[in-house]
Image: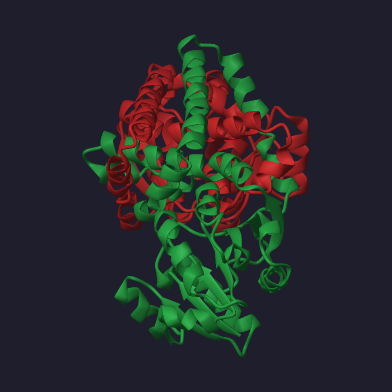
Chain colours: A green, B red
Amino acid sequence: MKVVVIGIGLIGGSLAKDIRVKYPDARILGIDKDASHQQEAKELGIIEGKASYEDLVNAEVVILSIPVDAMLSELPRVLNHIGEETLVIDAGSTKAEICQQVEDHPNRRNFLSCHPIAGTEFSGPSAAHEGLFEGKTNIICEVEKTAFKLQERGLELFRKLGMRIRYMNPESHDKHIAYVSHLSHISSFMLGKTVIEKEKNERDIFDMAGSGFESTVRLAKSSPAMWTPIFEQNRDNVIETLDEYIQNLQLFKQKLQDEDYPGIYKEMDNTNRIKSILEGIPLNKS
Amino acid sequence: MKVVVIGIGLIGGSLAKDIRVKYPDARILGIDKDASHQQEAKELGIIEGKASYEDLVNAEVVILSIPVDAMLSELPRVLNHIGEETLVIDAGSTKAEICQQVEDHPNRRNFLSCHPIAGTEFSGPSAAHEGLFEGKTNIICEVEKTAFKLQERGLELFRKLGMRIRYMNPESHDKHIAYVSHLSHISSFMLGKTVIEKEKNERDIFDMAGSGFESTVRLAKSSPAMWTPIFEQNRDNVIETLDEYIQNLQLFKQKLQDEDYPGIYKEMDNTNRIKSILEGIPLNKS
């Protein structure tokens, strides 16, 4: 199987590593606009070498794992270069604008729109690791628009990687993912900002930081280059989640100001059921 | 060494377990107002048996690990019952009100005011585990008010548990801890609330939740009985942190509304240094 990975970072690199294990005869080439990433990925054995756009015509699988703004121009370009039997998979964290962008592309049937919900706060080829996708969810959008044979190839690949598949339309994906992913990132970034701003002498305060703080602020290590275009493409949904989040924080603050401690207890008690919710589902653990 | 642990939950139970390892001849008794906790702690081998207040007079170490509201009445009561050579240690997450409460107690010199920054989102005797305090920070307040000999006994205990000691006054403790701990809990609880509220069909949305969401929402599993009185005692500081946090979220939202994406990038880029800050300190890992 000939595979070309475009964007050899955490997601693209991890996919390449798993494909190497699951398809021992796969030939995996890479394209990355960052020459040092390209070089690093080769040195780490993630890719065998550099691909060009001329290689796409013979590829069986092309994986696009690049920031979602770059995706808007790169995906049509890739679809222009592929062969009739090439499957193109994306891994974007937003889906509506990307799907719209190639809606009328003559090779739309070669594209399977995916969001593998996996990752860490780290990025680049060195962050790639085997088994990242095992047990994780892969959201597939507009599956009906992909050629049946190519759907099958994609599903077989994800099955081998150990992923659970969920089908959604792009608009539902973007709306829901704003709650369970995009809002978490903003809450974490702003928490980090609030604490950093407060303390001139960082050493003092961070000496007091425990695992709880580390956990809530972990996502503030994420890449701005990846996340800015996600927030841009999912702007309306993200603003809605932010409105509700801010409102809930203000309500909590009001209860504190009113010294309504039974009310504060109740707020936390009601939310405690997040415990059983998270336990009850096969969570995408890191 | 005779030890009495009052409140045999996550913190008290973990301290008891470590003491058993580090002081093999220690006799550890417990007091818990919850009879089932008392029983469970005995069955788990955390304590040898039940103590009464009459046992305190002969105890060398008394550990108070109970919610901070109960602490206000329990600490003076304990100080009333102890012997001249008894060291009393608390583990409260707030310090100012507790220290104030016993400021003029005739046995103030027997008390060492502590906040071991360790824990998980779980509670009760079954959550207790050995080694919880290894490498963690213990904040000690008003050390000068504790008898020198008893300070030594306390420090020796914490040294054996592998803790790093930091000295602070209670007001600074409460101010700083509001940022690195209390605010994290509220941001996490309100994030959980916002997401739960949104989705009638929980299964759908939580199926999409990844490790990032789990990480930011982890603290929303915490005990309301423990946290309500913490927020009550540290109300002014917590309101201040909430104000700043909400303001930063509103600013972020405004930038989204204005489509100021370079500004959003910058916000995240500036906060990314949380990475090196957290790496640069011996963090209290769970």
Residue in the foreground of this view, choosing between A71 and B196: A71
Q: Residue at x 48, y 70 (%)?
A: A80
Task: Check the image and name the residue furthest to the bottom.
Answer: A25
Residue A260 against residue B34 in the figure, above or below? above
- The image position of residue A202, as x and y in percent, is 26, 44
Left of B14 or right of it: where is B262?
Answer: left
Please state the horizontal and vertical placement of residue A131, each as a whole percent of the image.
60, 71
- Of B34 and B74, the residue lying toward us: B34
User: Left or right of B162: which side holds A160?
Assistant: right
Q: Position of residue A260 (x, y in %)?
A: 55, 11
Q: Residue at x 34, y 36 (%)?
A: B259
Q: Is A99 drawn above or below residue B199 in the view shown?
A: below
View extreme (top): residue:
A258
**Is residue B124 at least partly visible in the picture?**
no
Which residue is rendered at x = 66% and y = 54% of the image?
A142
Report which quarter residue A191 is drawn in: top left
The quarter of the displayed image where residue A139 is located: bottom right
In the image: residue A118, left or right of residue A136: left
Q: Viewer-proximal residue, A97 or B102?
A: A97
Whole-percent x, y for residue A147 in the image: 69, 67
- Label count reads 0
Foreground residue among B68 and B194: B194
| Residue B220 higher or lower than A48, as above or below | above
Q: Is residue A37 visible?
A: yes
Q: Residue at x 53, y 73 (%)?
A: A62
